[in-house]
Image: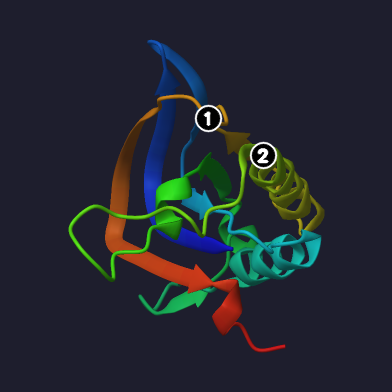
């Protein structure tokens, strides 16, 4: 499972001209689910993201977590994070999980974020053509792959 986390002042996702989800201060999380991912990856990734200390404290040091700043998350499914670009110029998406598994783990990841103390968890619409708007704060962008997390 892969995630791109962007610290934002605000963000929203729109589908067919209608806002599907929006938050103020917090994280925009683009989430890619790969073949072989399980609920364990969703649990580990959500715990890692919930505890990330990338908001600035009174000394302008990145020392505060989402909970510390009462931040929310907007989670957007994004199978293109699973792209393989080793050969040629057209990405291959063979590593991406099929829609049934990906949607199930996407929804479970959102539940895990709430169980990790994040009160505001907003979502895009799985499989839809989404327009994401954000005001990146910093900018701060972190990429996490569960294959690289310590056990």
Task: Residue at the far top: name it.
Answer: 17
Q: Nearer the viewer, residue 73 or 129?
A: 129
* Residue ID at (55%, 43%): 75
**Residue under label 2:** 103
Going from N to C along the chain, the mark reached first, 2 or 1, is 2
Quadrant position of residue 84: bottom left
**Residue under label 1:** 127
Residue 55 seen: no
Quadrant position of residue 5: bottom left
Q: Is residue 135 left or right of residue 7?
A: left
* Residue ID at (71%, 60%): 42
Rendering coords of residue 111 (x, y %) = 77, 46
Q: Nearer the viewer, residue 6 or 105?
A: 105
Q: Nearer the viewer, residue 150 or 118?
A: 150
| Residue 78 drawn above or below residue 137 | above
Rendering coords of residue 18 (x, y %) = 44, 12
| Residue 58 drawn above or below residue 2 | below
- Packing grade of label 1 (10 A; few <14, some 14-19, many >=20) is few
Q: Quadrant of the C terminus?
A: bottom right
Q: Is residue 60 left or right of residue 74?
A: left
Q: Nearer the viewer, residue 38 or 18?
A: 38
Cβ–Cβ under 8 Å for marks 2 and 1:
yes
Residue 106 seen: yes
Q: Is residue 16 left or right of residue 53?
A: left
Rendering coords of residue 22 (x, y %) = 49, 30
* Residue ID at (29%, 64%): 85
């Amino acid at each position: 499972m892969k995630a791109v986390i962007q610290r934002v002042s605000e963000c929203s996702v729109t589908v067919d001209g209608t806002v599907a989800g929006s938050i103020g201060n917090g994280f925009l999380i683009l989430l890619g689910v790969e073949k072989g991912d399980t609920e364990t990856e969703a649990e580990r990734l959500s715990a890692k993201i919930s505890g990330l200390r990338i908001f600035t404290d009174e000394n302008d040091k990145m020392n505060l977590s989402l909970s510390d700043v009462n931040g929310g998350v907007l989670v957007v499914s994004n199978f293109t994070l699973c792209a393989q670009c080793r050969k040629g110029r057209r990405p291959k998406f063979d590593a991406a999980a099929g829609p049934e598994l990906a949607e199930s783990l996407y929804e479970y990841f959102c539940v895990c974020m709430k169980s990790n103390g994040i009160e505001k968890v907003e979502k895009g619409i799985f499989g839809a053509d989404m327009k994401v708007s954000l005001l990146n704060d910093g900018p701060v962008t972190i990429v996490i792959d569960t294959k690289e997390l310590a056990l």
